Amino acid sequence: MMNFNLKRKGKFYRSAAILTVLVCLVMVMAFGLNTTHHVASSTTPRIIKKDSLASVKAFKEVYRVLKSPRCMNCHPSGDIPLQGDDSHLHTMSPKRGVEGKGLFAMKCANCHQPQNAPGVHTPPGNPNWHLPPADMKMVFQGKTPYQLAKQLVNPKQNGNKNMQQLIEHADDGLVLSGWNPGEGRTLPPISHAEFKKAWITWIKTGAYAPKK
């Protein structure tokens, strides 16, 4: 009788152990699925609805800002930044350098301090003032709306950014500096809030490029 009870207990403990393992596996799988969903949702923006007309219309507003001196001056076609509302070559002729922060002793941060310098047409400031790096220049100057839209969504040309990172870039410190350029400089043609709205609308409706 005792031997029979021991066998029953043994079967019970084995069944309980198997059940425990199965429950743990289900919990792990559920956690993994939830984590995967969270990661995917945090890196890929939800496309509200693809709408080429709305997307292109929004990009036209974006393009006006990106081609304004406040943006284009730091996205030149050459290796010397542009300057002023007329986007002339920087008078001190600083060079881009490998990291975009200047070459040799002429570093961007030597003149561009963390804040705007006081006075009219003095150097604007930002703790991270720089041009795009030499291996990914992200040129705005001379680009048509079609060319610039295509460039912006191409990770090989936009700083390795995915769509979600592009959305977040609207609030980047250097981007915001465009609306705080210091005395004597013209602001972008629309407010930052309007730009951000157009930027997100463009991306979330499909990031379509104008035909030209």
Image (cartoon, helix red, strand yellow):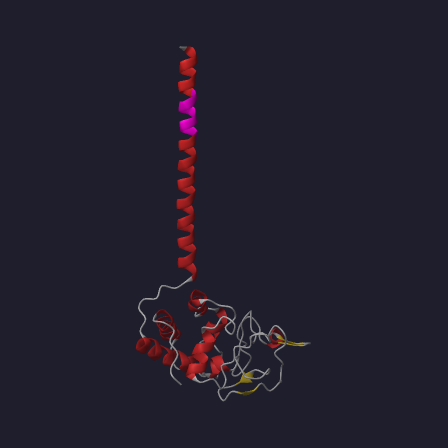
Which residue: 42% across, 18% down? 7
Give percent across and percent down for residue 73.
Answer: 52, 82
The image quadrant that residue 8 belongs to is top left
User: Magenta: predominant secondary structure element?
Assistant: helix
Give percent across and percent down for residue 37.
Answer: 39, 54
What is the tally of numbered marks visible in this picture? Answer: 0
Give percent across and percent down for residue 109.
Answer: 60, 73
Q: Nearer the viewer, residue 130 or 28?
A: 28
Q: Quadrant of the C terminus?
A: bottom left
Which residue: 36% across, 69% down? 204
Q: Is residue 10 left or right of residue 139?
A: left
Give percent across and percent down for residue 97.
Answer: 63, 76
The image quadrant that residue 55 belongs to is bottom left
Q: Is residue 197 left or right of residue 126?
A: left
Q: Is residue 139 magenta?
A: no
Any part of residue 205 in sight: yes
The image quadrant that residue 146 belongs to is bottom left
Magenta stretch: give its range: 10-17
In the picture as drawn, the residue positioned furthest to the top comes out as 1
Q: Quadrant of the N terminus?
A: top left
Say if 59 sits above or below 162 in the image: below
Q: Is residue 11 magenta?
A: yes
